[in-house]
Amino acid sequence: MGNCLHPVETSFSLDKNETEWLMDLLNYSYEENDYDFPSNYSVGAAAPCRSCNLLDSSSLPFFILTSVLGMLASGAVLFAILKPLFHWQICPSWPVLAQLAVGSALFSMAVPILAPGFNTVHSTGLCYLGYWVWYTSAFAQALLIGCYACLNPRVNIGQIRGLTLGLTVALWGAAGLLGLPVTLASDVYNDLCTLASDKDLEVLKSAHSAICFTIFTVFPLALLAANGLKKALSKESGPWVSVLWVWFIFWWPHGMVLLFDALVRSKIVLLPSCPSQQILDVMLNLAEVLAVLHCVATPLVLALFCHQTTRRSLVSLSPPARQSSPTDAFAGKC
């Protein structure tokens, strides 16, 4: 990660004569325009607030290792689910689990494109693709988990092919559309794929922050509230709570911090000091790190969920009914 103990010193410095000359120039311009210049003004106060970036080029090994582990784990889970010997009737939720594994694998593939210090991004098109795959896969996984939690208590998604296909197309299509704002707001600066600082794209960045806050933060809270309200009002169960909900832990802070950062950029929320801005920047980096780690944790969560579902299915299976013999059939006719 980045080194915060030795911050980079700015190359902009003024000696005593240059400072006096700059102060005289500022005082002269304010006197010409009949403005009152503050007496306690200092040139150092106008210096930019420099934050410690945790995700610089030194964090490249973290991104590469996470990407490799995520692709290997997701591929292993996907192979275990789709292999011919897999008992699909024991784990009827396998279509949802397979899509979650595909989403995790796609996210793992996009991590190196957006990793700082990799120096492989030289085209805006590749940057667009990286951001689009990054957030489309995340949005799709969130929507899959939410829809599965809402529909599974009433409808078995895995056993209705038409419903499974329709939900797959609808959810992945919606996720692709939701990933467009951040895609169009990204660009390449110094071989680094990042969000553009153009003020004309501020609307797209604000829309992306609102989408992330809704999908990653409000959506799981709404599911929990619906589950608790359903249990309180009736005996029927609400959205099915499962181990898959652990996924939202990795993305919940990301939605919160992005929304707060958008409010700060739009001057709706004013930070009182430079340390407050530095804390916000550190929180943005930590939230991104936690979100990246989900591609390693998601295959483990899927394996645990499949194991739990298989055990419940085996326990609930009743012994096969005894087949009637010809003698029993003859006795029945008599």
Image (cartoon, grey):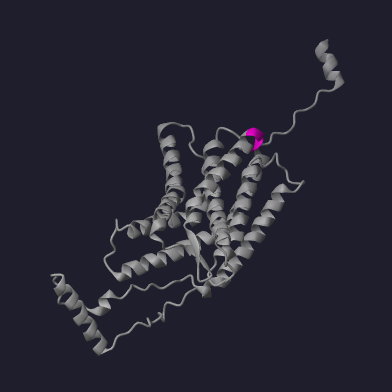
- Residue 296 visible in the picture: no
Which residue occupies 19% across, 82% down?
A: 24
Q: Is residue 59 above or below residue 158?
A: below
Residue 226 placement (x, y as % from top left): 43, 39
- Count of marks, rendered view: 0
Q: Quadrant of residue 115?
A: bottom right
Q: Is residue 34 above or below residue 215?
A: below
Q: Which residues are magenta?
A: 158-162
Which residue occupies 15% across, 73% down?
A: 32
Q: Is residue 159 left or right of residue 289?
A: right
* 6 vs 321, nearest the viewer: 6
Which residue occupies 68% across, 36% down?
A: 317
Q: Is residue 61 above or below residue 8?
A: above
Residue 126 placement (x, y as % from top left): 58, 61
Q: Quadrant of residue 14?
A: bottom left
Q: Is residue 217 left or right of residue 44?
A: right
Q: Quadrant of residue 319?
A: top right
Q: Is residue 248 above or below residue 323?
A: below
Image quarter hosting the C terminus: top right
* 320 vs 196, nearest the viewer: 196
What kind of secondary structure does the magenta stretch mostly adopt?
Answer: helix
Q: Is residue 87 left or right of residue 226?
A: right
- Residue 49 visible in the picture: yes
Residue 121 placement (x, y as % from top left): 57, 67
**Magenta run includes residue 220:** no
Residue 207 placement (x, y as % from top left): 42, 51
